[in-house]
Amino acid sequence: MNRHLGLLVLCQGLFLTNNVAFIAINGLVGLSLAPRPWMATLPVMGYVVGGALSTGLVARTQRRWGRRGSFQIGLAVAVASALACAGAASARSFALLCLATVVAGYYSANATLYRFAAAELVAPAWREKAVSLLMAGGLLGAVIGPNLAATTRGWLPAPFAGAYLALAGVALLSMAAMAFIRFPAPPVRAGGASAGRPLAEIARQPAFIVAAAGGALGYGVMNLLMAATPLAMDVCGLPFSDAAFVLQWHVIGMFAPGFFTGHLIRRFGALPVMAAGLLLNLGCIAVALSGVELHRFLVALFLLGVGWNFLFTGSTTMALATYRPEEKDRVQAVLNFCIFATLAVTSFASGVLVTTRGWQWLNLGSLVPVALIALALGWLAGTRRRGAAA
């Protein structure tokens, strides 16, 4: 840990405060404003669609203005979009809410690069631990995010409009912290030097394929269930305070393992840690299918969070070994696009399934991406065994 990494961990925590609060309230605000109930999670979907559409632009801003400049632009967008969401909630405009969350996706596309930037702030031998510690910073979001949404929902006459204003303040605080971080200068490339291998060549690496699939599908499973949880609990007659409590422990599960996931990866490797995350996802689904009491939501979402941490940290660490420094902007943009595209699909599917088919069918549907992750991990393990034998 150093000062710059510590400040980036703080920024990660503030980013997750924004993310968790968005997830906690966007579905409920959307449900109150949407013309049809199945459209309730469209604002959540807009957030990740905006992220997917922004990945290429973010890669260009990273090359043009560097890490800090690009991150600060993302935070400025976060402030503006949060204010627009507050205006949408006050004006009861579903269209404006969806548009504002699409714009907010640019901030998300920027901030998801914090994990790669963390690896650049330490010596190469400590990259796994730097990524893991950054993930642990999300605990700040676990503590602040749900409580912020619950305590500020009544600040203004329109429900949750005050929460959006509070999120603008969170982004301003992150801008102040980001101003003191010094990122390493990007490698200088001579005029005729190569920009690295073609993307097609990089993407053919088995480790890259599994890192992209594990990160995107693991995030997709988590988003599919997390985005629907406030709606499902509302349908089951549980108050918003219970939903905020469940989401808080879910996010603790997502980021508390960051204090030791890096050690596990260094000792056992990324692939076994990702396999453990897959098993935890299966445990989450089993608990969720067993009933709809508060304690079952709590245990299921906590297991889901820990499983996501193992899958996402493992896939990020695996991806770091698949590209060279001069290739990082293009490759990281591709990895983030895979994640956001998957999140867009699962955000929409989450609202449709939970409002038309119910919580049980939503969990059964999540077995599909879990099975795909299992196939990817098994394929890479087999490829490596054959390579070792040869």
Image (tube, helix red, strand yellow):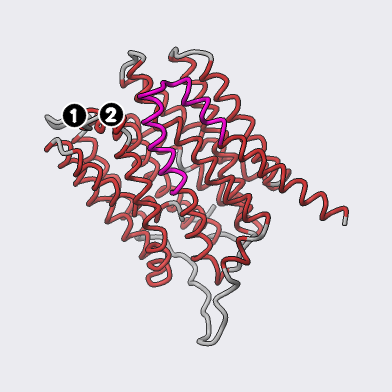
Q: Name the residue that disc number 1 marks.
A: 159
State the image coordinates of residue 16 (x, y, percent, origin top left).
40, 42
Secondary structure at badge 1 equals: loop
Image: 120 above or below 190: above
Q: Is residue 218 visible?
A: yes
Front-most of 250 and 201?
201
- From this view, report whether residue 188 is shown above or below residue 313: below
> Is 343 one of the magenta-colored residues?
yes
> Which residue type carries mark 1?
Pro
Residue 148 appearing in the image: no
**Where is residue 10 drawn, in percent x and y?**
41, 47
Please tell me the numbered disc located at residue 28.
2
In the rendering, at what x and y percent does residue 254 appear?
A: 50, 35
Q: How many marks?
A: 2
Say which label, 2 or 1, has the lower sequence index.
Answer: 2
Disc 2 vs disc 1: Cβ atoms closer than 8 Å?
A: yes
Q: Which residues are magenta?
A: 341-368
Q: CA distance from mark 2 to mark 1?
A: 10 Å
